[in-house]
Image (spheres, rainbow, N blue to C red):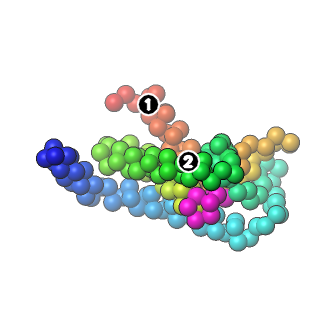
Amino acid sequence: MSNKINNLREIKKEFSKKNNIYFLVLIFIIFVTDRISKLKIIRSFSDDTYYLNDFINLDLIWNIGIGFGLLSTDSSLLYNFVSIIVAVVIIYLIYILIISDNLDKFILSIIIGGALGNFYDRLIYKAVPDFIDVHYNNFHWFTFNIADIFITMGIMIFIIRGIFIKV
């Protein structure tokens, strides 16, 4: 028991380091940016598609699955189960962020900021609003949102770091 208490004290000590505040601010900025973009789209769009150019449309779609619409279902049991898994993953990522070095903290902050944005939507709307439709002629990529961009960027940076920067 004493060992667990010492571990919790160490986590609290790590979390209270000043530089962690910067990463919490980054998470907050990404979350707010995502929220603002989604609120703007939700308030402005109904069934309309807004054509930006030959490659990008804005088209509101409600995603009840996870990334790229995976596990989309009308089952509230599966939806709630997936939501719980997402929450556990976010909590785990926050723990890893606390004990990581600054480069990993930056990468995880980007991922967590986006994940929190989509998780918030899962809780509030029971679906995630996706609205960026990238296409070429009749080929359309998955519709996504700002949070998805940050999650993808974070994962790409994490992979690139893993390949080129040996720890």
Instruction: Work out whether residue 93 or residue 137 is closer to the camera in this orientation and state it.
Output: 93
**Pointer 2: residues within 10 angstroms few (<14), some, or many (20+)?**
some
Q: Is residue 150 visible?
A: no
Instruction: Work out whether residue 56 or residue 120 is closer to the camera in this orientation and state it.
Output: 120
In the displayed structure image, the side of residue 155 where residue 17 appears, left or right = left
Q: In the rendering, at what x and y percent does residue 166 appear?
A: 37, 28
Q: In the rendering, at what x and y percent does residue 145 appear?
A: 64, 54
Q: Is residue 50 visible?
A: yes
Q: In the rendering, at what x and y percent does residue 2 appear?
A: 13, 47
Magenta part of the protein: which range?
A: 122-129
User: Residue shown at 34%/48% (left/top)?
Assistant: 95
Q: Could you say whether the residue bearing mark 1 is in a helix, strand or loop?
A: helix
Most extreme residue toward the left, as rendered? 2
Residue 127 drawn in magenta:
yes
Q: In the rendering, at what x and y percent does residue 116 appear?
A: 50, 56
Instruction: Work out whether residue 8 or residue 16 is closer to the camera in this orientation and state it.
Output: 8
Most extreme residue toward the right, as rendered? 138
User: Residue shown at 74%/59% (left/top)?
Assistant: 60
Q: Which mark is residue 162?
A: 1
Q: Earlier in the sequence, mark 2 or mark 1?
A: 2
User: Residue shown at 48%/62% (left/top)?
Assistant: 29
Q: Quadrant of residue 71?
A: top right
Callout 1, which amino acid? Gly
11 versus 70 height, above or below = below
Residue 124 drawn in magenta:
yes
The residue where tag 2 is placed is 82
Task: Calculate the distance from the C-alpha at mark 2 to the C-alpha at mark 1.
Answer: 28 Å
